[in-house]
Structures are given as C-alpha cells and as structure tokens.
Image (tube, grey):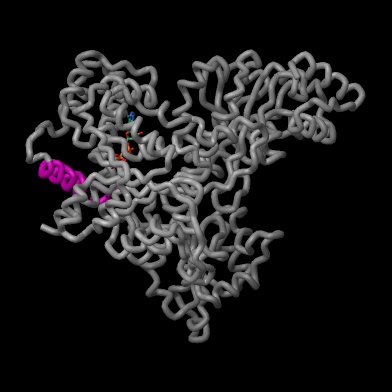
Amino acid sequence: MDQRDVRAAWERFVERGALASELRSPVANSWQRSRSHQVAIDRTTAPIVAEAELFRQRAKHVALRHAARRALENSRTFLSDAQSIMILTDPSGLIIDTEGDARVIDAGRAVHLEHGGRWSEADIGTNAIGAAMAEARPVQIHGAEHFCAEVQRWTCAAVPVCDPVDGEVLGIVDISGPATTFNPHSLALAVCVGQQVESVLARAIKEDHERLLQHYLAKRAIWASDESLLIDRRGTILHGSELARKAIRDNLRGDGHDPPTRILKRLDFAEWPAKLKELIPGVSVDLVAHDDTGIGAVIVLHARRRLAGPDRGLQKQDQPDNRRMSSGPRTAPPQGLRFCEEPAVKRPPCADSAPRRLRHAPSPATSFVVADPAVQAVVRRVEVAAARQMPILIRGETGTGKEQLARHAHAASGRQGAFVPVNCAALPDSLIEAELFGYAEGAFTGARRGGAPGLVQEADGGTLFLDEIGDMPVALQAVLLRLIDDWTVRPVGGARRRVDIFLVSATNAGLEDAVAQGRFRSDLLYRLNTLEVTLPRLRDRTDFESIVRHLIDGIDPGCEIAAPTMAALAARSWPGNIRELRNILARIALSSGDGPGSSVIADLIGQAPQPRSGSLQDMQLASILAVHAETAGNVSETARRLGVSRNTVYRALGQTAAR
Ligand SMILES: Nc1ncnc2c1ncn2[C@@H]1O[C@H](COP(=O)(O)OP(=O)(O)OP(=O)(O)O)[C@@H](O)[C@H]1O
C-alpha cells in the first residue's frame, strides 16, 4: 500500500471503524488498540512527565541506559546522515535518552518526542514505540500509519530490548525522523542496536554474578552454621542450601510462572531487607552493590544462632542501610566466569521480513577495513573456507582483528545460529567442562533450574569461536577432539546429543612450540587448521590511514587527524595493534579541542614503546607490570589503559610469576 492508500484506509477507519484488509497486521492491530484506548486522533502531543519523574525513571533504568549508551553513540554518524534520531524508552514507553541529528531532536519537541515524552499506544495511539511494546516485537510505522494526525509527519522503527535471562521487555530502541526520511533499513538497524544492547546487558549480568559469587565466597565462613542463599538483583538464585531455597519458596509468592524471588526485581533495592524480613521472619540480609548500584544480596536464615540466643552481629547485618552496602570486590573476578561470549538472546519473532534476513546481513566486512592486499587475500580464503564450513585457524598478534575476522567467517558461512566466542585462556579447569558442554538440572549446587546448555550447544547451528586456543588445558583438548570426531556433546550429568557446529579458532601464540612442549595436542591442531591464515601486524599493513579514519569515524566523526599527527601515528610500532590504535585515537579525540599540535596529543603519540627489536616482549611486559601496579592490580583497567586485551595482561602476569 502506498501512503495515499494508507491515508484513505486511515480515514475509513476513523470514520467508520472499517479496517482495510491490505493493511499490515501490526498497523491494523495497533489502530484497533488505539481505538479501544479511546485515543483522540487530534491529539497533538504525547504526554510528558515532570523533570523530577524523568530523573527518577532514568535512575531506575540505569543499567539499560548504560548498556545502550555505546550503541547509541556509535550510531551517531548514521543518524546524522539519515536525518534521524535514536530513542531509548523505559518499558512504559517513556523516553529516557535520545541521540542523533540535532535538528530532528528539535523538531521532535513539537510532539513531545523528547526526554520525558511517553509514547505508549494508550498515550498517543499507533507509533512504533507503542506498537513494539504492545506486540513485543520489532515494528516499523510510517507516516499515515500513525493514529494521530499530527504524528503522521513522522516515520519510526522500534524494537523491544528484552532481559537476556527472562525475556521481559526492559525498554524500546527506536529510530525516528521526519516522514520524508523513511528508510526500510531503519528497522534492521534498530534490531541490530537492540541486539547489541541485550548483549551488553547479558555481559553485565554475568559480571554481576561473578562479583556476587566472590562476595559470597569471601564471607561464607561467617554464615558457615546458617542456611544462606545468594540471589541476584533480578531475583535469580545463584547459590543456596536446599533449606534456604525452600524457605524462600514457601514465603515469597511469585506471579504466574515467575519464580517466587522475581517479586524482588520489582522492588527498590533499598526496600529488600524490610520486605524480606516481613516475609521471612528472622532473616538477615546482606546487600551487595557495585558502583553504587545494587546487584544482589545474601539472605541468611540464622537457624542455629537464634536457638542460641540474640546476636549483636546479626542485628548489625540487618540494617537496611545503603552505607553498609558492600561495594563488591575490586579485585579481578574469578577467571572461570570470564567468558566473552555473546549469550543467546531471547528475541520475539520479527514483524517484518527485513530483520529476519538481517541476522547476518550487516556483514562484518562493512565494519572493518580490508584495503591491505595481504588482508584481502586472507579474507577471501576465509570466505571460501567458511562457505564450506571448514575449520579455520586464525593466527595473529593481539589486537590484529582475529575475532573480527572470525565474526566475518560466521557471516560468510551463512549459518543461522549464534556466533559464540569462548576465551580458552580464561577458562578455569574446574568449571570449563560445565561451561562448554553444559550441565543437567541438579548436576551441582547452584546449577540452574532446567540445567544449562553450555556454550557448545549455544553454537549449535552457528559458529563456535575458540579464542586463545593455545591456552586450552590439555585435559580439555581431548574432550574437544572427541567433539570434532563425532559432533556430539554430553552435558555434565546429562545425556549425549548431536550438534552442528562451524569451528573457528584463534591464537596469538606459537602453537608449534606448545606442541613441542607437550602443552598442545598435535592431532587437535591438525583438526583445527584445515585452513590456517595469519593476520599481519598493524605496522606491516599498507592501509594504516584507512584504519585510522575508520576508527576515528566510530569514535568521533567530527574529529580530524592532522597530517603530522597521522605521520607520527604511522611511525609507531603498535605492539597492541588495532586495539591499541583505537585506544590512542579515543584519547586523541578527547584532546582534539586542544589543537593538533597540543602537547597532550604529542605525549600520547610519543608515549608508547617504539622499538622493533627483540626486546619488545620485555618492554611490553615491563609496561604491563608498571600499569598493573599503578592501577592497584586492576586487570581490566590495565588492559584498557594499554589498549591490549585482558588475556595479554593475564599472560604477562603469568610469565612473571613463572620467572
Ligand atoms: N581491519 C580492521 N579495521 C578496523 N578495525 C578493526 C579491524 N580489525 C580489528 N579491528 C578492531 O580492533 C579491535 C581488536 O580486534 P579483535 O578483538 O578482533 O582482535 P584480536 O586479534 O581478536 O585480539 P586479541 O588477540 O587480543 O583477542 C576491535 O575493536 C576491532 O573492532
């Protein structure tokens, strides 16, 4: 239907309630809902909340905002080119963040498409935000498809952002612009951004779980004679004795299919102790926070202590006082939980065909530079092997783009399943099997209800990316070999099942040495490297300037790199390769207001070690150790400052420990 037909259909609908059969179903459904909400078609603006309420809601959805920030910022260039804006709303359709073309942001104010505006269907009739909320799936609404006449000047595409654990809608990502800027791909972009946000959220949940477990383990001795339960901010029980679980189940009531503890998710964190004490008499609650945000709690049933008499320590623990909230451990998290996978995200079915096609459509090739002929040859070989699903081994120094290339291989393979990266260097022996191959319900304490599929099964139908393969423990290499032999997995405590996996591995270490020293099985190496490619070091690439421009575009499109700066950059040795370059460029962008000749920029460029000699490794090691000490042992911060991966830092620490 073209816009004229849609307008005619809209007129018939508002006059007589007649629905044209050619209307797209999300539009027809939304018109009907708008009518049942009794929305007047001459409503000119969405309702807008007071500043204080906006502030409150922003604080409440800080995790969502944080997860969306990078994606919103990265879309800035596209949005300006497309004269559009990107909007983040909370689950009620309240706009909490916007990014994009300043003129469009200005124009949006006329209809309250701005911070504080509320865009549910009940508020302002059919629009993409409201329809995506109501249908719990991606929806694009264009021009006359809007319910209120004034809003028909707009075009918008929206996608719900769902909780990666329970699938609950947390908010909406929307791309809007004047109707003249209609672009059918906006919905696809919104879907990609939504997926990015969900991935960031999933990673954040995982990190919070690490912190909670560390907190729990550190203090476990205190509760040794009590029944205790570790629970995260969303009400998921991470660990706990059977008795404590039962006490929670018996005393808390969930709604519908929700686990009983989900009730806590809807409460303000500071209300937890009072609520829990009201529901379960005699408990104490130890709240855990990180960066001033509540991430979970340890609930303790002091069965034996209460029998023995009142306990002062218990009363102290009971205080629902934010000042007492532990800020969580600042030390490095336990390695076992540091996977870098992109967890499978529960996503509602797509409304239109575009996003479905687009699962792999935003080819990674478009997001990385391959102007260097050697890299072009590598990419071509990878594409051919990927199309035939041949195992690929990618070699290259840290930060040369191995993961990026692996993602490209996944896209080129055309596989519909997920791309699941596994960092073998970060896998602890104790948890590795369960994390990789999954576990059955009840396999061990803290095992999730229904078990967990494991990373290999998550990659079923997709791609398993084994990063830092050289660091995989020998015992596990045998299990991996078996997987490659018969493509079956057996979850811990469960039954064997078949999987269909495309295997891509990467290493920045000399695997031959590892084979010679018996740390890596040669038979496994030959199964992994049906195609073997090596990515060149950044300093050996001929497309340095293109990479700089590409990276700076993603960081701050307005930032110009002056010729002398470019020349100085090109002269550096770049031990951290493209990752290090990106890091330095981000800092240059920050100081660009100081002018290209500024001493800050000169310092940044001159700062890194320059030698190309054999002592490079030692120098790298020395700088890692220096920054590691400077950051009081914070591995992530060290990696960030130096522009290297955390594995590089861990490896350096391991090397010094071994010396
Ligand atoms: N050809 C390229 N063009 C632009 N950016 C790139 C390119 N290759 C990699 N990058 C960027 O460089 C950074 C490092 O890439 P990636 O993580 O793929 O490297 P890696 O070799 O896997 O690193 P490590 O061995 O440390 O895990 C990423 O931000 C990535 O987006």
Main SS of the magenta segment?
helix
Residue lying furthest right: 16
- Which percent across, then down, holds residue 175? 58, 26
- Which percent across, then down, holds residue 409? 40, 37
User: Considering depth in this image, is 36 or 610 the residue closer to the camera?
Assistant: 610
Q: Quadrant of the C terminus?
A: bottom left
Q: Is residue 423 above or below residue 358?
A: below
The answer to whether residue 465 is seen in the rendering is yes
How many dots with numbers?
A: 0
State the residue at coordinates (66%, 24%): 112
Ligand 1 rendered quadrant: top left
Q: Is residue 254 above or below residue 86?
A: below
State the residue at coordinates (62%, 53%): 266
Q: Quadrant of the N terminus?
A: top right
Q: Is residue 20 left or right of residue 379?
A: right
The answer to whether residue 125 is seen in the rendering is no
Q: Is residue 303 above or below residue 444?
A: below
State the residue at coordinates (29%, 29%): 375
Which region of the structure is painted magenta? 617-636
Q: Is residue 388 above or below residue 115?
A: below
Q: Is residue 655 left or right of residue 500?
A: left
- Which percent across, then down, holds residue 616? 11, 39
State the residue at coordinates (47%, 39%): 66
User: Considering depth in this image, is 97 or 23 the residue closer to the camera?
Assistant: 23
- Which percent across, then down, holds residue 519? 21, 59
Q: Is residue 456 magenta?
A: no
